[in-house]
Image (spheres, helix red, strand yellow):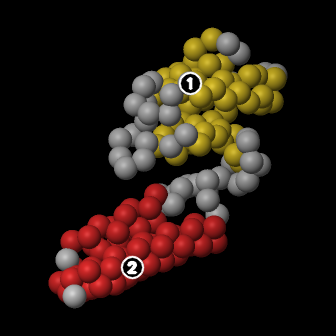
Amino acid sequence: MITRTWKIETAIGRRSITVETDGRAEPVLIYLDGKQHAATVYQKGIVAKICFPFTVDGEELLLVAFGTKIDLVFRGKFLTSGEVYMPGGTVPLWVKVLLVTVNLALIVIGIRFGLVPILFGINGTIFCCLLVSPFYTKQKAILISVFITAVCWLMSVVFVLAMNYFLR
């Protein structure tokens, strides 16, 4: 069970908000000053996520969760990190370009070398998609995406070389 607590200052006074979740499909409970205030569930997908708006004392808050990372947005800022909240509504152009490039290369590799290198490449593509999250800066997401993709390609090359060596 994951529990996070934040203190906020509203027009009415100091309030305590607690979120309890198991990080998966079970309901996510939101408590205001120890009493249940709201509940939501994770959205299904490759990684469970939440973007749940709710109101406390007339002020809008947003519960943002991506996997097991949970944070609360209040007055435009994440309460845990203090960073400005930027809605992640669309997939950035660099991710689209990376996906197209990797998938085109996978077709060529698949024709030449078979299924296993394709699986490595698809894993790299999926992990790159997972990095489209409000918890990563653009630079960090690009760096991690390139690293994961490079590791998957390296694994593909090693696999192909090993197969060529053993098939001789």
SS at mark 1? loop
Above-or-below relation of 9 to 163:
above
Asked whether 69 or 134 is in front, the reply is 69
- Most foreground residue, 47 or 19: 47
Quick one: which residue is furthest to the top in this view? 35
Q: Residue at x 65, y 53 (%)?
A: 85
Q: Please name the residue that numbered disc 2 is placed on.
A: 158
Residue type indicated by callout 2:
Val
Residue at horizontal 74 percent and vertical 22 percent from the top = 16
Image point (81%, 23%), residue name: 14
Mark 2, Cα crowd under 10 Å, few <14 / some 14-19 / many 20+, is: few
Amino acid type of the residue tagged 1 in the rendering: Met
Q: Is residue 149 left or right of residue 162?
A: right
Q: Is residue 105 visible?
A: no
Q: CA distance from mark 1 to mark 2?
A: 40 Å
Mark 1 touches mark 2? (CB < 8 Å) = no
Horizontal arrangement in the rendering, residue 103 relative to residue 73 (left or right): left
Which of 50 and 104 lies nearest the eye of the viewer?
Answer: 104
Report whether residue 168 is seen: yes
The residue that label 1 is drawn on is 1
Q: Position of residue 32 (x, y in %)?
A: 66, 19
Secondary-structure class at tag 2? helix
First in residue order: circle 1 vs circle 2: 1
Residue 132, numbered label: none
